């Protein structure tokens, strides 16, 4: 809740929040995009945007076996309109709409709730330190110069119904080897991560006063492995899924990793992402694009009915400063607490609390939510109108 007013400002399509400034946009095909992302006036990224959303099913019948969806074909941006206060976004969030034109209308179509902007309290300090030698206690909640992009999945799954046993008994339940792990050593699994990587984007021609090359690192916490062999079946249509992070030169001829036609011809796709890499161009001192893939393997359970739940499906990647600033940028934030002990004759009798002018005498009372009345008067905000 914004108990003392909102700390961000929206002017047109530009959002300003403390040290951050960026422009929001909506592609009618791929959905939300951010442009010209800056922190403390320093340029961070040209664009952060969605490229494609896919879901690949499996099953023993041909119908379920070929249930594979590339959702850009649905023109995702035109469907970004059903954000509900108190459900998808906080009640006091600010909503930003979008306009687009399609063949069903001669006038621009307005979606009033394509974006919601709000300040998120993660309930975790960005920086914390307790020092006993000098008896200082610091608690910081500010801006560190990093940004997180997070996605989660929910919806109605497609069922593969249990049929009669094949005469050759291919079912997993009869051929699966079960072995209970009974000791700590048996239950200790080792992932085959032989070569840890730390992708950092930087300009080697720029040095800071310490001789470091400032840059930004990519931390992908949504790592996944596509089990389909490269080049087989419909895998060429999502060849970007072979890589967790891929770096290529920025080209006008390579605006995106997918297309609205990818769903219909995945074995011979119009956009071949692998071609972006196969030309093997030099990326030093060039404008580059980082293509980041996140995903997970979903085993359906009864709890997925009637809709799949979001816990456990969230995936994130971070853009984090790597020697980009001389110190933690959150040090300049007033939203901090410092607690120093008051010692009398060698004994701590009390503490001195410094909040740097931030008010504490605020009661958080949620505003009344009249959204039920709003959607009764304008049902198209929440449902597909006929």
Image (spheres, helix red, strand yellow):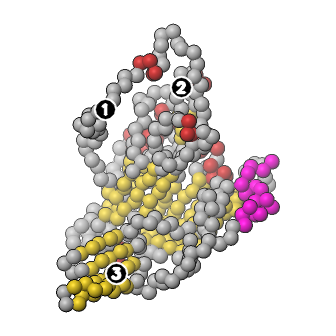
**Quadrant of res 242:** top left
User: In x, y percent, where is residue 354?
Assistant: 37, 85
Which label is found at residue 338? 3
Looking at the rendered image, the disc whose residue lies closer to the viewer, 2 or 3, is: 3
Is residue 134 visible in the rendered image? The answer is yes
In the rendered structure, are the residues bearing label 2 and label 1 in contact, judged by CB atoms less than 8 Å apart? no
Q: In the displayed structure, does residue 270 sit left or right of residue 355?
A: right
What span is in magenta? 370-386
- State the separation of the CA atoms marked 1 and 3: 48 Å
Q: In the displayed structure, does residue 80 sit left or right of residue 204?
A: right
Task: Name the residue beneath numbered marker 1.
Answer: 181
Label 2: element kind: loop
Label 3: element kind: strand
- State the separation of the CA atoms marked 2 and 3: 58 Å
Residue extending furthest toward the top: 167
Looking at the rendered image, the disc whose residue lies closer to the viewer, 2 or 1, is: 1
Q: How many labels does the image show?
A: 3
Which label is found at residue 362? none
- State the separation of the CA atoms marked 2 and 1: 29 Å
**Quadrant of res 129:** bottom left
Q: Per the image, is 376 magenta?
A: yes
Mark 1 vs 3, N-terminal side: 1
Quarter of the image with the N terminus is bottom right
User: In x, y percent, where is residue 183?
Assistant: 26, 35
Task: Name the residue beneath numbered marker 2.
Answer: 59
Nearest to the observer: residue 219 or residue 342: 342
């Amino acid at each position: 809740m914004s108990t003392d007013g909102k700390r961000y400002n929206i002017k047109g399509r530009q959002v300003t929040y403390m040290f951050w400034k960026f422009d929001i946009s909506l592609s009618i095909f791929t959905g939300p995009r951010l442009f010209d992302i800056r922190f403390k006036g320093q340029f961070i990224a040209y664009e952060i945007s969605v490229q494609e959303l896919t879901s690949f099913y499996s099953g023993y019948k041909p119908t379920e076996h070929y249930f594979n969806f590339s959702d850009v074909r649905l023109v995702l941006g035109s469907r970004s309109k059903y954000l509900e206060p108190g459900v998808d976004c906080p009640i006091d969030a600010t909503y930003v709409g979008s306009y687009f034109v399609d063949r069903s209308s001669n006038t621009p179509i307005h979606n009033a709730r394509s974006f919601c902007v709000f300040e998120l309290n993660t309930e975790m300090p960005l920086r914390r330190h307790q020092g006993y030698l000098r008896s200082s206690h610091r608690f910081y909640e500010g801006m560190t110069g990093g940004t997180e992009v997070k996605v989660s999945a929910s919806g109605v799954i497609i069922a593969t119904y249990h049929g009669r046993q094949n005469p050759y008994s291919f079912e997993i339940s009869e051929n699966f080897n079960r072995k209970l792990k009974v000791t700590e050593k048996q239950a200790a699994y080792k992932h085959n991560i032989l070569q840890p990587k730390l992708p950092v984007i930087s300009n080697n021609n720029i040095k800071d006063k310490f001789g470091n090359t400032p840059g930004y690192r990519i931390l992908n916490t949504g790592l996944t492995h596509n089990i389909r062999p490269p080049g087989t079946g419909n895998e060429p249509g999502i060849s970007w899924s072979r890589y967790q992070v891929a770096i290529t030169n920025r080209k006008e001829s390579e605006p995106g990793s997918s297309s609205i036609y990818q769903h219909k011809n995945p074995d011979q796709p119009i956009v071949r992402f692998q071609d972006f890499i196969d030309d093997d161009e030099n990326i030093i001192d060039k404008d580059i694009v980082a293509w980041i893939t996140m995903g997970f393997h979903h085993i359906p359970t009864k709890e997925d009915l009637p809709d799949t739940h979001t816990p456990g499906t969230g995936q994130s990647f971070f853009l984090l400063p790597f020697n980009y600033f001389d110190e933690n940028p959150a040090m300049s934030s007033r939203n901090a607490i410092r607690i120093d002990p008051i010692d009398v004759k060698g004994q701590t009798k009390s503490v001195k609390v410094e909040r740097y002018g931030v008010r504490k005498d605020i009661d958080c009372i949620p505003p009344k939510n009249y959204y039920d009345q709003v959607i009764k008067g304008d049902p198209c905000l929440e449902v597909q109108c006929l």
